[in-house]
Image (cartoon, rainbow, N blue to C red):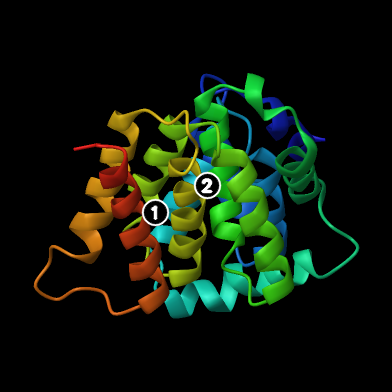
């Protein structure tokens, strides 16, 4: 019963004791931990939503994430017994009325999908990228904030998914020049400005296309 109550806890009702109990009950049980975190992922005020998961995964090495998170999310995405949090997320991203959802919530959906894109299932990854495109297309502010958050992640699949989503957003006729310029600046500074530039050819291609699109509409 206590674990079920965690879904609805606000920041105010999530104490140090709550955190300690959560950590104790999920310690060494990646399946249970990730399932719960994905269940909380889209709750904007929840202290363990996907922003927490993002921070937790970002500090791990790529090898450690592959051993834990990537194994779990790949199994979930290729198994019919999908946990409710992942199922809800995929449904929202694929069929929900996203136009009326605030940017803060779009950011949570996009960030969740981005980390799911680390799956080794190419079929699942392609479907997730399609959903990211749908989610970000009409939300340039959320898309730009998401790009800022993941651009430094060392998993190329995660970064690729967000770059593709941002490129789709940039190609919308309604995008403002300020957002296109913002996306282009983030992409340029990461992939073309440093002396030791990332060598991943697809990431550089999508980044270049974002920059080209910004230039083509006069964004600076």
Between 28 and 77, the one nearer to me in the picture: 77
Q: Which residue is mark 1?
A: 150
**Residue beneath the point at 59% across and 67% down:** 69
Quadrant for the N terminus in the image: top right
**Residue beneath the point at 75% across and 44% down:** 94
Q: Is residue 49 visible?
A: no
Give the residue at the far right of this rendering: 80
Query: What numbered label is drawn on residue 111?
Result: 2
**Residue beneath the point at 74% across and 38% down:** 92
Packing grade of label 1 (10 A; few <14, some 14-19, many >=20) is: many
Q: Secondary structure at mark 2?
A: helix
Q: Is residue 134 left or right of residue 52?
A: right
Q: Is residue 102 visible?
A: yes
Quadrant for the C terminus in the image: top left
> Upstream in the sequence, badge 1 or badge 2?
2
Between 53 and 176, the one nearer to me in the picture: 176
Quarter of the view holding residue 150: bottom left
Q: Are marks 1 and 2 in contact (CB under 8 Å)?
A: yes
Between 178 and 12, the one nearer to me in the picture: 178
């Amino acid at each position: 019963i206590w674990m079920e109550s965690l879904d609805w806890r606000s920041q105010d009702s999530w104490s140090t004791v709550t955190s300690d109990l959560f950590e104790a009950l999920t310690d060494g049980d990646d399946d249970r931990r990730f399932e719960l975190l994905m269940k909380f992922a889209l709750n904007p005020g929840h202290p363990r939503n996907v922003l927490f998961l993002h921070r937790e995964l970002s500090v791990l090495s790529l090898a450690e994430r592959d051993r834990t998170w990537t194994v779990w999310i790949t199994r979930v995405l290729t198994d019919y017994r999908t946990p409710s949090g992942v199922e809800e997320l995929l449904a929202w991203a694929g069929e929900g009325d996203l136009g009326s959802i605030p940017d803060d919530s779009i950011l949570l959906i996009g960030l969740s999908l981005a980390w799911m894109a680390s799956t080794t299932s190419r079929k699942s990854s392609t479907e997730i990228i399609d959903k990211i495109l749908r989610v970000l297309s009409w939300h340039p502010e959320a898309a730009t904030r998401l790009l800022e958050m993941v651009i430094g992640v060392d998993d190329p699949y995660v970064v690729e998914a967000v770059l593709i989503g941002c490129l789709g957003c940039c190609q919308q006729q309604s995008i403002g020049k300020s957002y296109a310029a913002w996306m282009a600046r983030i992409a340029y500074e990461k992939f073309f400005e440093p002396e030791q530039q990332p060598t991943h050819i697809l990431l550089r291609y999508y980044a270049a296309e974002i920059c080209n699109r910004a230039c083509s509409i006069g964004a600076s």
